[in-house]
Image: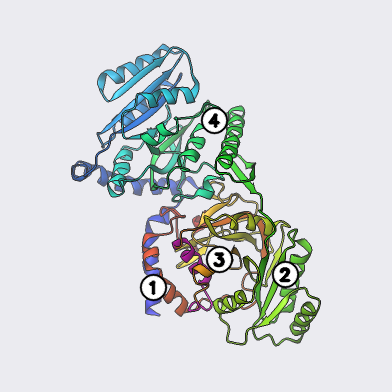
Protein backbone atom coordinates (compact mmCIF):
# COMPACT_ATOMS: atom_id res chain seq x y z
CA UNK A 1 0.00 0.00 0.00
CA UNK A 2 2.91 2.37 0.72
CA UNK A 3 4.12 1.92 -2.87
CA UNK A 4 0.68 2.93 -4.16
CA UNK A 5 0.72 6.04 -1.99
CA UNK A 6 4.15 6.96 -3.36
CA UNK A 7 2.94 6.46 -6.93
CA UNK A 8 -0.06 8.70 -6.34
CA UNK A 9 2.13 11.37 -4.75
CA UNK A 10 4.46 11.14 -7.74
CA UNK A 11 1.65 11.52 -10.23
CA UNK A 12 0.28 14.41 -8.20
CA UNK A 13 3.65 16.07 -8.48
CA UNK A 14 3.66 15.51 -12.24
CA UNK A 15 0.31 17.26 -12.41
CA UNK A 16 1.31 20.17 -10.19
CA UNK A 17 1.90 22.55 -13.07
CA UNK A 18 -1.51 21.61 -14.43
CA UNK A 19 -3.48 22.57 -11.34
CA UNK A 20 -4.29 25.90 -12.96
CA UNK A 21 -5.60 24.38 -16.13
CA UNK A 22 -7.81 26.16 -18.61
CA UNK A 23 -11.31 26.92 -17.48
CA UNK A 24 -14.09 29.04 -18.87
CA UNK A 25 -13.80 30.95 -15.62
CA UNK A 26 -11.39 33.77 -16.44
CA UNK A 27 -9.96 34.09 -12.94
CA UNK A 28 -8.42 30.60 -13.19
CA UNK A 29 -6.45 31.55 -16.27
CA UNK A 30 -5.46 34.84 -14.68
CA UNK A 31 -4.08 32.92 -11.73
CA UNK A 32 -2.21 30.58 -14.08
CA UNK A 33 -0.78 33.64 -15.85
CA UNK A 34 0.55 35.10 -12.59
CA UNK A 35 2.31 31.85 -11.76
CA UNK A 36 3.63 31.52 -15.32
CA UNK A 37 4.90 35.14 -15.28
CA UNK A 38 7.30 34.28 -12.46
CA UNK A 39 8.67 31.32 -14.41
CA UNK A 40 9.14 33.46 -17.53
CA UNK A 41 10.86 36.18 -15.49
CA UNK A 42 13.44 33.67 -14.26
CA UNK A 43 13.84 32.32 -17.79
CA UNK A 44 14.46 35.78 -19.25
CA UNK A 45 17.02 36.63 -16.57
CA UNK A 46 19.02 33.53 -17.50
CA UNK A 47 18.57 33.95 -21.28
CA UNK A 48 22.01 35.43 -22.03
CA UNK A 49 23.80 32.58 -20.28
CA UNK A 50 21.60 30.00 -21.98
CA UNK A 51 22.21 31.45 -25.45
CA UNK A 52 25.97 31.53 -24.80
CA UNK A 53 25.83 27.78 -24.16
CA UNK A 54 23.87 26.99 -27.33
CA UNK A 55 25.84 24.98 -29.88
CA UNK A 56 23.38 25.93 -32.60
CA UNK A 57 22.15 29.50 -33.21
CA UNK A 58 20.06 29.48 -36.40
CA UNK A 59 18.60 32.67 -37.80
CA UNK A 60 14.82 32.65 -37.73
CA UNK A 61 13.05 34.75 -40.33
CA UNK A 62 9.68 36.06 -39.16
CA UNK A 63 7.39 36.77 -42.11
CA UNK A 64 4.62 39.32 -41.72
CA UNK A 65 2.17 40.48 -44.40
CA UNK A 66 0.68 43.89 -43.58
CA UNK A 67 -2.31 45.73 -44.98
CA UNK A 68 -4.05 48.77 -43.44
CA UNK A 69 -3.32 47.52 -39.93
CA UNK A 70 -4.36 49.49 -36.85
CA UNK A 71 -1.17 51.38 -36.05
CA UNK A 72 -1.22 50.63 -32.34
CA UNK A 73 -1.51 46.90 -32.97
CA UNK A 74 1.08 47.02 -35.74
CA UNK A 75 3.61 48.71 -33.45
CA UNK A 76 2.95 46.17 -30.71
CA UNK A 77 3.35 43.31 -33.14
CA UNK A 78 6.67 44.52 -34.53
CA UNK A 79 7.89 45.44 -31.04
CA UNK A 80 7.17 41.90 -29.86
CA UNK A 81 9.78 40.73 -32.38
CA UNK A 82 12.25 43.47 -31.49
CA UNK A 83 11.90 42.50 -27.82
CA UNK A 84 12.93 38.88 -28.36
CA UNK A 85 15.72 37.84 -25.99
CA UNK A 86 17.11 35.57 -28.71
CA UNK A 87 18.95 38.00 -31.03
CA UNK A 88 19.44 35.99 -34.23
CA UNK A 89 16.33 36.84 -36.20
CA UNK A 90 15.14 38.90 -39.11
CA UNK A 91 11.68 40.35 -39.63
CA UNK A 92 10.50 40.26 -43.25
CA UNK A 93 7.53 42.61 -43.66
CA UNK A 94 5.58 43.01 -46.87
CA UNK A 95 3.28 46.01 -47.04
CA UNK A 96 0.49 44.63 -49.21
CA UNK A 97 -0.57 47.83 -50.96
CA UNK A 98 -1.88 49.56 -47.81
CA UNK A 99 -4.05 52.63 -48.47
CA UNK A 100 -2.92 54.28 -45.23
CA UNK A 101 0.30 56.20 -45.67
CA UNK A 102 0.79 55.99 -41.91
CA UNK A 103 1.39 52.25 -42.22
CA UNK A 104 4.35 52.86 -44.53
CA UNK A 105 5.65 55.49 -42.16
CA UNK A 106 5.55 53.14 -39.17
CA UNK A 107 7.29 50.38 -41.11
CA UNK A 108 10.04 52.71 -42.30
CA UNK A 109 10.62 54.00 -38.77
CA UNK A 110 11.16 50.47 -37.47
CA UNK A 111 13.41 49.57 -40.40
CA UNK A 112 15.57 52.61 -39.70
CA UNK A 113 16.06 51.55 -36.09
CA UNK A 114 16.96 47.89 -36.63
CA UNK A 115 18.87 46.46 -39.60
CA UNK A 116 17.30 43.05 -38.95
CA UNK A 117 13.99 44.42 -40.21
CA UNK A 118 13.32 44.21 -43.95
CA UNK A 119 10.39 45.96 -45.62
CA UNK A 120 8.97 45.52 -49.10
CA UNK A 121 6.17 47.84 -50.28
CA UNK A 122 3.90 46.33 -52.93
CA UNK A 123 2.19 48.89 -55.18
CA UNK A 124 -1.00 46.81 -55.28
CA UNK A 125 -2.49 44.25 -52.96
CA UNK A 126 -1.65 40.62 -53.76
CA UNK A 127 -3.68 39.18 -50.91
CA UNK A 128 -2.34 37.34 -47.90
CA UNK A 129 -0.88 34.48 -49.94
CA UNK A 130 0.87 36.76 -52.41
CA UNK A 131 2.17 39.03 -49.66
CA UNK A 132 3.42 36.13 -47.54
CA UNK A 133 5.18 34.56 -50.53
CA UNK A 134 6.79 37.93 -51.20
CA UNK A 135 8.02 37.98 -47.60
CA UNK A 136 9.34 34.44 -47.98
CA UNK A 137 11.30 35.50 -51.05
CA UNK A 138 13.41 37.95 -49.02
CA UNK A 139 13.91 35.63 -46.03
CA UNK A 140 17.42 34.26 -45.49
CA UNK A 141 17.02 32.47 -42.16
CA UNK A 142 17.29 28.73 -41.78
CA UNK A 143 13.78 28.68 -40.33
CA UNK A 144 10.61 30.62 -41.05
CA UNK A 145 8.25 31.82 -38.32
CA UNK A 146 4.78 33.17 -39.12
CA UNK A 147 3.35 36.24 -37.40
CA UNK A 148 0.15 38.08 -38.26
CA UNK A 149 0.36 41.86 -38.39
CA UNK A 150 -1.75 42.49 -35.27
CA UNK A 151 -0.64 39.53 -33.12
CA UNK A 152 2.23 39.32 -30.66
CA UNK A 153 5.02 36.93 -29.73
CA UNK A 154 5.98 36.26 -26.14
CA UNK A 155 9.48 37.70 -25.46
CA UNK A 156 10.93 34.20 -24.99
CA UNK A 157 9.27 32.68 -28.08
CA UNK A 158 12.36 32.40 -30.28
CA UNK A 159 14.52 31.44 -27.30
CA UNK A 160 12.34 28.41 -26.62
CA UNK A 161 12.26 27.46 -30.30
CA UNK A 162 16.06 27.51 -30.49
CA UNK A 163 16.35 25.71 -27.15
CA UNK A 164 14.24 22.97 -28.73
CA UNK A 165 16.44 22.95 -31.84
CA UNK A 166 19.58 22.58 -29.74
CA UNK A 167 18.11 19.41 -28.30
CA UNK A 168 16.83 18.19 -31.68
CA UNK A 169 18.63 20.02 -34.52
CA UNK A 170 17.06 17.73 -37.12
CA UNK A 171 13.56 19.16 -36.52
CA UNK A 172 11.67 20.61 -39.49
CA UNK A 173 8.49 21.86 -37.80
CA UNK A 174 7.96 23.38 -34.36
CA UNK A 175 4.73 24.74 -32.92
CA UNK A 176 3.61 26.09 -29.55
CA UNK A 177 0.54 26.77 -27.45
CA UNK A 178 -1.30 30.07 -27.87
CA UNK A 179 -3.94 32.31 -26.36
CA UNK A 180 -6.03 35.27 -27.49
CA UNK A 181 -5.99 38.97 -26.74
CA UNK A 182 -9.36 40.68 -26.58
CA UNK A 183 -8.89 44.35 -25.76
CA UNK A 184 -6.06 44.23 -23.24
CA UNK A 185 -7.12 40.91 -21.77
CA UNK A 186 -5.40 37.59 -22.41
CA UNK A 187 -7.89 34.74 -22.51
CA UNK A 188 -8.93 31.49 -24.22
CA UNK A 189 -5.62 29.62 -24.00
CA UNK A 190 -5.21 26.65 -26.29
CA UNK A 191 -2.99 24.07 -24.60
CA UNK A 192 -2.30 21.64 -27.43
CA UNK A 193 -1.21 18.02 -27.70
CA UNK A 194 2.01 16.87 -29.32
CA UNK A 195 1.90 15.97 -33.01
CA UNK A 196 -1.47 14.35 -33.69
CA UNK A 197 -2.00 13.61 -37.40
CA UNK A 198 -5.65 12.59 -37.08
CA UNK A 199 -6.50 15.66 -35.03
CA UNK A 200 -4.80 17.69 -37.76
CA UNK A 201 -7.23 16.19 -40.26
CA UNK A 202 -10.11 17.26 -38.01
CA UNK A 203 -9.02 20.85 -37.33
CA UNK A 204 -6.01 23.11 -37.72
CA UNK A 205 -5.01 22.70 -34.11
CA UNK A 206 -1.37 23.69 -34.75
CA UNK A 207 -2.23 27.32 -35.52
CA UNK A 208 0.41 29.57 -33.95
CA UNK A 209 3.34 29.90 -33.22
CA UNK A 210 4.49 27.94 -36.25
CA UNK A 211 8.15 27.61 -37.31
CA UNK A 212 9.17 25.60 -40.39
CA UNK A 213 12.53 24.90 -42.00
CA UNK A 214 12.86 27.32 -44.93
CA UNK A 215 14.20 24.79 -47.45
CA UNK A 216 11.13 22.65 -46.90
CA UNK A 217 8.79 25.56 -47.61
CA UNK A 218 10.78 26.46 -50.71
CA UNK A 219 10.66 22.87 -51.91
CA UNK A 220 6.85 23.00 -51.66
CA UNK A 221 6.70 26.30 -53.56
CA UNK A 222 5.48 28.42 -50.64
CA UNK A 223 1.82 29.12 -50.03
CA UNK A 224 -0.72 28.13 -52.69
CA UNK A 225 -3.00 30.89 -54.08
CA UNK A 226 -5.87 28.42 -54.42
CA UNK A 227 -5.75 27.91 -50.64
CA UNK A 228 -6.33 31.61 -49.86
CA UNK A 229 -8.37 31.84 -46.68
CA UNK A 230 -6.91 28.69 -45.21
CA UNK A 231 -3.39 28.93 -46.56
CA UNK A 232 -1.78 28.12 -43.22
CA UNK A 233 -3.79 24.91 -42.81
CA UNK A 234 -2.96 23.90 -46.37
CA UNK A 235 0.74 24.57 -45.79
CA UNK A 236 0.91 22.47 -42.61
CA UNK A 237 -0.90 19.59 -44.31
CA UNK A 238 1.59 19.65 -47.18
CA UNK A 239 4.65 20.11 -44.96
CA UNK A 240 3.74 17.24 -42.64
CA UNK A 241 3.38 14.94 -45.64
CA UNK A 242 7.11 15.48 -46.24
CA UNK A 243 8.47 15.17 -42.70
CA UNK A 244 7.71 13.61 -39.34
CA UNK A 245 10.37 15.64 -37.57
CA UNK A 246 7.81 17.72 -35.70
CA UNK A 247 7.98 19.09 -32.16
CA UNK A 248 5.55 20.85 -29.87
CA UNK A 249 6.57 23.35 -27.20
CA UNK A 250 3.90 23.22 -24.46
CA UNK A 251 4.15 26.91 -23.65
CA UNK A 252 2.08 29.90 -24.74
CA UNK A 253 4.45 31.71 -27.09
CA UNK A 254 1.87 33.43 -29.31
CA UNK A 255 -0.92 35.88 -28.57
CA UNK A 256 -3.65 36.02 -31.22
CA UNK A 257 -5.44 39.36 -31.20
CA UNK A 258 -9.19 39.32 -31.80
CA UNK A 259 -10.52 42.63 -33.12
CA UNK A 260 -13.90 43.68 -34.54
CA UNK A 261 -12.47 43.52 -38.06
CA UNK A 262 -10.65 40.21 -37.75
CA UNK A 263 -11.68 37.10 -39.68
CA UNK A 264 -12.85 35.51 -36.43
CA UNK A 265 -15.53 38.18 -36.07
CA UNK A 266 -16.68 38.38 -39.72
CA UNK A 267 -19.20 35.66 -40.67
CA UNK A 268 -18.62 35.97 -44.41
CA UNK A 269 -14.83 35.71 -43.98
CA UNK A 270 -15.19 32.72 -41.66
CA UNK A 271 -17.42 30.96 -44.18
CA UNK A 272 -14.82 31.44 -46.93
CA UNK A 273 -12.06 30.23 -44.62
CA UNK A 274 -14.00 27.10 -43.66
CA UNK A 275 -14.70 26.32 -47.30
CA UNK A 276 -11.01 26.80 -48.14
CA UNK A 277 -10.05 24.49 -45.29
CA UNK A 278 -12.43 21.83 -46.56
CA UNK A 279 -10.80 22.07 -50.00
CA UNK A 280 -7.34 21.88 -48.42
CA UNK A 281 -8.32 18.66 -46.65
CA UNK A 282 -9.78 17.22 -49.85
CA UNK A 283 -6.52 18.02 -51.64
CA UNK A 284 -4.57 16.31 -48.86
CA UNK A 285 -6.62 13.14 -49.27
CA UNK A 286 -6.04 13.22 -53.02
CA UNK A 287 -2.28 13.65 -52.60
CA UNK A 288 -2.19 10.81 -50.09
CA UNK A 289 -4.32 8.62 -52.36
CA UNK A 290 -6.90 8.10 -49.64
CA UNK A 291 -10.57 7.72 -50.49
CA UNK A 292 -12.86 9.75 -48.31
CA UNK A 293 -15.27 12.65 -48.07
CA UNK A 294 -14.60 15.81 -46.06
CA UNK A 295 -17.62 17.05 -44.12
CA UNK A 296 -17.72 20.24 -42.07
CA UNK A 297 -19.22 19.45 -38.65
CA UNK A 298 -18.70 22.83 -36.96
CA UNK A 299 -16.74 26.05 -37.17
CA UNK A 300 -13.26 24.96 -38.19
CA UNK A 301 -14.10 21.33 -37.39
CA UNK A 302 -14.22 18.54 -39.98
CA UNK A 303 -14.97 14.87 -40.29
CA UNK A 304 -13.35 12.66 -42.89
CA UNK A 305 -15.64 9.83 -43.85
CA UNK A 306 -13.13 7.30 -45.10
CA UNK A 307 -14.36 4.69 -47.55
CA UNK A 308 -14.13 1.16 -46.21
CA UNK A 309 -12.10 -1.09 -48.50
CA UNK A 310 -13.96 -4.35 -49.19
CA UNK A 311 -15.99 -6.22 -46.56
CA UNK A 312 -13.43 -7.94 -44.35
CA UNK A 313 -14.54 -10.30 -41.60
CA UNK A 314 -14.77 -8.73 -38.12
CA UNK A 315 -14.68 -10.84 -34.96
CA UNK A 316 -16.58 -9.19 -32.10
CA UNK A 317 -15.40 -10.70 -28.80
CA UNK A 318 -17.65 -10.28 -25.74
CA UNK A 319 -16.62 -11.74 -22.35
CA UNK A 320 -19.59 -12.36 -20.04
CA UNK A 321 -20.68 -13.77 -16.71
CA UNK A 322 -24.35 -14.05 -15.69
CA UNK A 323 -26.58 -10.93 -15.96
CA UNK A 324 -28.31 -12.17 -19.09
CA UNK A 325 -30.23 -8.91 -19.52
CA UNK A 326 -26.99 -7.03 -20.25
CA UNK A 327 -25.71 -9.53 -22.79
CA UNK A 328 -29.11 -9.87 -24.43
CA UNK A 329 -29.38 -6.12 -24.95
CA UNK A 330 -25.82 -5.95 -26.27
CA UNK A 331 -26.29 -8.77 -28.78
CA UNK A 332 -29.73 -7.56 -29.86
CA UNK A 333 -28.52 -4.03 -30.65
CA UNK A 334 -25.55 -5.38 -32.61
CA UNK A 335 -27.89 -7.52 -34.68
CA UNK A 336 -30.68 -5.01 -35.12
CA UNK A 337 -28.76 -1.74 -35.53
CA UNK A 338 -25.47 -2.60 -37.23
CA UNK A 339 -25.44 -1.82 -40.94
CA UNK A 340 -22.21 -3.78 -41.48
CA UNK A 341 -23.02 -7.49 -41.63
CA UNK A 342 -19.79 -9.42 -42.17
CA UNK A 343 -19.01 -10.11 -38.55
CA UNK A 344 -18.98 -13.01 -36.14
CA UNK A 345 -19.98 -12.79 -32.49
CA UNK A 346 -17.85 -14.70 -30.01
CA UNK A 347 -19.28 -14.85 -26.51
CA UNK A 348 -16.76 -15.99 -23.90
CA UNK A 349 -18.57 -17.36 -20.87
CA UNK A 350 -16.56 -17.19 -17.67
CA UNK A 351 -18.27 -19.16 -14.90
CA UNK A 352 -21.89 -18.13 -15.47
CA UNK A 353 -24.18 -19.83 -12.96
CA UNK A 354 -27.46 -17.99 -13.44
CA UNK A 355 -29.96 -20.27 -15.22
CA UNK A 356 -31.39 -17.44 -17.33
CA UNK A 357 -27.91 -16.74 -18.66
CA UNK A 358 -27.25 -20.38 -19.41
CA UNK A 359 -30.56 -20.66 -21.26
CA UNK A 360 -29.84 -17.55 -23.31
CA UNK A 361 -26.34 -18.74 -24.24
CA UNK A 362 -27.79 -22.05 -25.40
CA UNK A 363 -30.48 -20.29 -27.40
CA UNK A 364 -28.17 -17.90 -29.30
CA UNK A 365 -25.69 -20.65 -30.05
CA UNK A 366 -28.36 -23.03 -31.37
CA UNK A 367 -29.79 -20.26 -33.55
CA UNK A 368 -26.34 -19.60 -35.02
CA UNK A 369 -26.36 -16.02 -33.76
CA UNK A 370 -22.95 -16.39 -32.21
CA UNK A 371 -20.21 -18.76 -31.13
CA UNK A 372 -20.20 -19.47 -27.39
CA UNK A 373 -16.93 -20.62 -25.85
CA UNK A 374 -16.21 -21.35 -22.21
CA UNK A 375 -13.26 -20.04 -20.23
CA UNK A 376 -13.04 -22.16 -17.12
CA UNK A 377 -10.12 -20.45 -15.37
CA UNK A 378 -10.52 -17.65 -12.80
CA UNK A 379 -11.44 -14.24 -14.20
CA UNK A 380 -8.59 -12.62 -16.11
CA UNK A 381 -9.79 -10.14 -18.73
CA UNK A 382 -6.52 -10.23 -20.66
CA UNK A 383 -6.36 -14.01 -20.70
CA UNK A 384 -10.03 -14.36 -21.67
CA UNK A 385 -9.59 -12.15 -24.72
CA UNK A 386 -6.30 -13.74 -25.75
CA UNK A 387 -8.06 -17.13 -25.55
CA UNK A 388 -10.95 -15.88 -27.69
CA UNK A 389 -8.67 -14.43 -30.38
CA UNK A 390 -7.18 -17.89 -30.93
CA UNK A 391 -10.63 -19.10 -31.95
CA UNK A 392 -11.62 -16.01 -33.95
CA UNK A 393 -11.79 -16.05 -37.74
CA UNK A 394 -11.78 -12.32 -38.43
CA UNK A 395 -9.07 -10.21 -39.98
CA UNK A 396 -10.22 -7.45 -37.61
CA UNK A 397 -10.95 -7.76 -33.89
CA UNK A 398 -13.43 -5.84 -31.78
CA UNK A 399 -13.15 -6.15 -28.02
CA UNK A 400 -16.55 -5.27 -26.58
CA UNK A 401 -18.02 -5.26 -23.10
CA UNK A 402 -21.30 -7.08 -22.54
CA UNK A 403 -22.78 -3.97 -20.89
CA UNK A 404 -22.72 -1.92 -24.10
CA UNK A 405 -25.44 -1.24 -26.66
CA UNK A 406 -25.11 0.11 -30.17
CA UNK A 407 -26.43 3.60 -30.96
CA UNK A 408 -24.96 4.54 -34.35
CA UNK A 409 -25.76 1.94 -37.08
CA UNK A 410 -22.46 2.55 -38.91
CA UNK A 411 -20.30 2.04 -35.82
CA UNK A 412 -18.44 -0.89 -37.37
CA UNK A 413 -17.83 0.93 -40.67
CA UNK A 414 -16.52 3.97 -38.78
CA UNK A 415 -14.11 1.93 -36.68
CA UNK A 416 -13.07 -0.20 -39.64
CA UNK A 417 -12.35 2.85 -41.82
CA UNK A 418 -9.59 3.78 -39.36
CA UNK A 419 -8.40 0.28 -38.47
CA UNK A 420 -7.74 -0.37 -42.18
CA UNK A 421 -5.12 2.40 -42.27
CA UNK A 422 -1.65 0.96 -41.74
CA UNK A 423 -0.44 3.86 -39.60
CA UNK A 424 -3.29 3.31 -37.13
CA UNK A 425 -2.98 0.49 -34.61
CA UNK A 426 -6.26 0.70 -32.70
CA UNK A 427 -9.42 2.80 -32.70
CA UNK A 428 -11.98 3.41 -29.99
CA UNK A 429 -15.57 4.63 -29.92
CA UNK A 430 -17.48 7.33 -28.08
CA UNK A 431 -19.21 5.65 -25.15
CA UNK A 432 -22.09 7.26 -23.27
CA UNK A 433 -23.78 6.61 -19.98
CA UNK A 434 -27.53 5.97 -20.24
CA UNK A 435 -28.11 9.59 -19.13
CA UNK A 436 -26.29 10.75 -22.30
CA UNK A 437 -23.13 11.96 -20.62
CA UNK A 438 -19.70 10.85 -21.79
CA UNK A 439 -18.19 7.72 -20.29
CA UNK A 440 -15.27 7.39 -22.71
CA UNK A 441 -13.69 9.86 -25.14
CA UNK A 442 -10.14 8.58 -25.10
CA UNK A 443 -7.79 7.71 -22.25
CA UNK A 444 -5.33 10.15 -20.68
CA UNK A 445 -2.29 8.60 -18.99
CA UNK A 446 -1.82 10.03 -15.50
CA UNK A 447 -5.34 11.43 -15.19
CA UNK A 448 -6.82 10.56 -11.82
CA UNK A 449 -3.67 8.70 -10.77
CA UNK A 450 -2.75 6.14 -13.42
CA UNK A 451 -5.12 6.65 -16.36
CA UNK A 452 -8.55 8.19 -16.81
CA UNK A 453 -11.09 9.11 -19.43
CA UNK A 454 -11.16 12.50 -21.14
CA UNK A 455 -14.39 14.51 -20.93
CA UNK A 456 -15.77 12.06 -18.37
CA UNK A 457 -19.41 12.92 -17.45
CA UNK A 458 -19.58 15.85 -19.90
CA UNK A 459 -22.95 16.06 -21.72
CA UNK A 460 -22.76 14.13 -24.99
CA UNK A 461 -23.66 17.24 -26.99
CA UNK A 462 -20.95 19.41 -25.38
CA UNK A 463 -18.05 19.99 -27.79
CA UNK A 464 -15.63 20.16 -24.86
CA UNK A 465 -12.43 22.13 -24.52
CA UNK A 466 -11.60 23.71 -27.88
CA UNK A 467 -14.11 21.36 -29.54
CA UNK A 468 -11.93 18.30 -28.88
CA UNK A 469 -14.85 16.15 -27.71
CA UNK A 470 -16.44 16.54 -31.14
CA UNK A 471 -13.58 15.52 -33.42
CA UNK A 472 -11.52 12.48 -34.25
CA UNK A 473 -8.14 12.71 -32.56
CA UNK A 474 -5.14 10.71 -31.42
CA UNK A 475 -4.89 9.44 -27.84
CA UNK A 476 -2.41 7.44 -25.80
CA UNK A 477 -5.07 4.77 -25.34
CA UNK A 478 -8.72 3.86 -25.81
CA UNK A 479 -10.82 1.61 -23.62
CA UNK A 480 -11.15 -2.11 -24.24
CA UNK A 481 -14.88 -1.72 -23.64
CA UNK A 482 -15.05 -1.01 -27.39
CA UNK A 483 -11.81 -1.22 -29.34
CA UNK A 484 -11.05 -2.37 -32.90
CA UNK A 485 -7.69 -3.32 -34.33
CA UNK A 486 -6.21 -5.43 -37.07
CA UNK A 487 -5.56 -8.98 -35.93
CA UNK A 488 -2.01 -8.80 -37.25
CA UNK A 489 -1.26 -5.79 -35.01
CA UNK A 490 -2.69 -7.61 -31.98
CA UNK A 491 -0.48 -10.62 -32.68
CA UNK A 492 2.65 -8.60 -33.43
CA UNK A 493 2.52 -6.82 -30.06
CA UNK A 494 1.79 -10.06 -28.21
CA UNK A 495 -1.87 -9.55 -27.33
CA UNK A 496 -3.03 -8.48 -23.87
CA UNK A 497 -0.53 -8.69 -21.00
CA UNK A 498 -2.02 -11.38 -18.75
CA UNK A 499 -0.30 -9.95 -15.67
CA UNK A 500 -2.91 -7.19 -15.88
CA UNK A 501 -5.82 -9.45 -15.11
CA UNK A 502 -8.39 -6.79 -14.20
CA UNK A 503 -7.31 -3.20 -14.86
CA UNK A 504 -5.16 -1.27 -17.36
CA UNK A 505 -4.71 -4.19 -19.74
CA UNK A 506 -6.32 -2.15 -22.53
CA UNK A 507 -4.13 0.88 -21.78
CA UNK A 508 -1.04 -1.33 -21.72
CA UNK A 509 -2.01 -2.84 -25.09
CA UNK A 510 -2.38 0.62 -26.64
CA UNK A 511 0.97 1.82 -25.31
CA UNK A 512 2.66 -1.23 -26.81
CA UNK A 513 0.93 -0.50 -30.11
CA UNK A 514 2.39 3.03 -29.99
CA UNK A 515 5.82 1.53 -29.29
CA UNK A 516 5.20 -0.64 -32.35
CA UNK A 517 5.02 2.54 -34.44
CA UNK A 518 1.27 3.01 -34.86
CA UNK A 519 -1.18 5.66 -33.67
CA UNK A 520 -4.24 5.19 -31.48
CA UNK A 521 -7.40 6.97 -32.66
CA UNK A 522 -10.61 7.92 -30.89
CA UNK A 523 -13.64 8.76 -33.02
CA UNK A 524 -16.83 10.48 -31.84
CA UNK A 525 -18.71 9.13 -34.85
CA UNK A 526 -19.06 5.55 -33.58
CA UNK A 527 -21.36 5.82 -30.57
CA UNK A 528 -22.53 3.22 -28.04
CA UNK A 529 -24.01 3.23 -24.59
CA UNK A 530 -21.87 1.75 -21.84
CA UNK A 531 -23.24 0.78 -18.45
CA UNK A 532 -19.78 1.11 -16.94
CA UNK A 533 -18.67 -1.84 -14.81
CA UNK A 534 -22.23 -3.16 -14.63
CA UNK A 535 -21.04 -6.75 -15.06
CA UNK A 536 -18.41 -7.12 -12.36
CA UNK A 537 -18.27 -3.77 -10.59
CA UNK A 538 -15.48 -1.18 -10.54
CA UNK A 539 -12.25 -2.57 -9.10
CA UNK A 540 -8.61 -1.66 -9.66
CA UNK A 541 -6.33 -4.10 -7.85
CA UNK A 542 -3.23 -2.71 -6.20
CA UNK A 543 -1.12 -5.32 -7.98
CA UNK A 544 -2.29 -4.01 -11.39
CA UNK A 545 -1.50 -0.41 -10.45
CA UNK A 546 1.97 -1.37 -9.18
CA UNK A 547 2.76 -3.53 -12.22
CA UNK A 548 1.54 -0.93 -14.73
CA UNK A 549 3.44 1.95 -13.12
CA UNK A 550 6.66 -0.03 -12.91
CA UNK A 551 6.32 -1.23 -16.51
CA UNK A 552 5.57 2.21 -17.91
CA UNK A 553 7.70 4.34 -15.57
CA UNK A 554 9.48 6.08 -18.47
CA UNK A 555 6.21 6.93 -20.21
CA UNK A 556 4.77 8.29 -16.96
CA UNK A 557 7.93 10.36 -16.45
CA UNK A 558 7.61 11.90 -19.90
CA UNK A 559 3.86 12.44 -19.65
CA UNK A 560 1.05 11.69 -22.07
CA UNK A 561 2.06 13.26 -25.42
CA UNK A 562 -1.58 13.77 -26.37
CA UNK A 563 -2.43 15.70 -23.21
CA UNK A 564 -0.79 19.04 -22.47
CA UNK A 565 1.20 19.26 -19.19
CA UNK A 566 -0.44 22.61 -18.44
CA UNK A 567 -3.78 20.85 -17.96
CA UNK A 568 -4.93 19.32 -14.69
CA UNK A 569 -4.46 15.64 -13.92
CA UNK A 570 -6.71 15.65 -10.87
CA UNK A 571 -9.88 13.73 -11.75
CA UNK A 572 -11.80 15.51 -8.96
CA UNK A 573 -11.09 18.97 -10.36
CA UNK A 574 -13.78 20.35 -12.69
CA UNK A 575 -11.01 21.69 -14.89
CA UNK A 576 -9.89 18.22 -16.05
CA UNK A 577 -12.82 17.96 -18.46
CA UNK A 578 -10.77 19.01 -21.45
Q: CA distance from mark 3 to mark 1?
A: 27 Å
Q: CA distance from mark 3 to mark 4?
A: 39 Å
* Position of residue 113 in the picture relative to residue 427 (left or right): left
Image disc number at residue 227: 4
Q: Residues within 10 Å of mark 4 (few under 14, many from 20)?
A: many
Q: CA distance from mark 3 to mark 2?
A: 26 Å
From the image, tell me which residue sits under label 1: 550
Image disc number at residue 488: 3
| Residue closer to the observer: 260 or 207 | 207
Q: Of discs 3 and 2, which sits in the foreground?
A: 3
Identify the image quadrant of residue 398. bottom right
**Horizontal and vertical percent for residue 102?**
39, 14
* Position of residue 329 in the picture relative to residue 74 (left or right): right
Q: CA distance from mark 4 to mark 1?
A: 49 Å
Q: Residues within 10 Å of mark 1 (few under 14, many from 20)?
A: few
Image disc number at residue 330: 2
Q: Secondary structure at mark 4?
A: helix
Amino acid sequence: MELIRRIWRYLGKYGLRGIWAYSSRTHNYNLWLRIEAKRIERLLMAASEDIARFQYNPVISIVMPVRNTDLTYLKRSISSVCNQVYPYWELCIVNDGSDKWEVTEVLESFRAKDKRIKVVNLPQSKGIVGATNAALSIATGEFIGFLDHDDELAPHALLQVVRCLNKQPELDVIYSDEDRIIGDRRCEPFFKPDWSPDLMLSMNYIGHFLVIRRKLIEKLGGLRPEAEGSQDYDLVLRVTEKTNRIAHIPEILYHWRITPGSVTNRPESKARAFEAAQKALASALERRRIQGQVVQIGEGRYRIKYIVQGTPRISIIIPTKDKAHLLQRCVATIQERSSYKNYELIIVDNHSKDQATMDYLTFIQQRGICKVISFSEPFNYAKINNFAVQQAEGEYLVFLNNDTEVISPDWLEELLSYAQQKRIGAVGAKLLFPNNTIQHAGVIIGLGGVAGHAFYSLPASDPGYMGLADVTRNCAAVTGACMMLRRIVFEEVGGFDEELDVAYNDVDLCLRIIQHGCYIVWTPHAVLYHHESASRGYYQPERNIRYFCEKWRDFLDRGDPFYNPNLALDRTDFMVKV
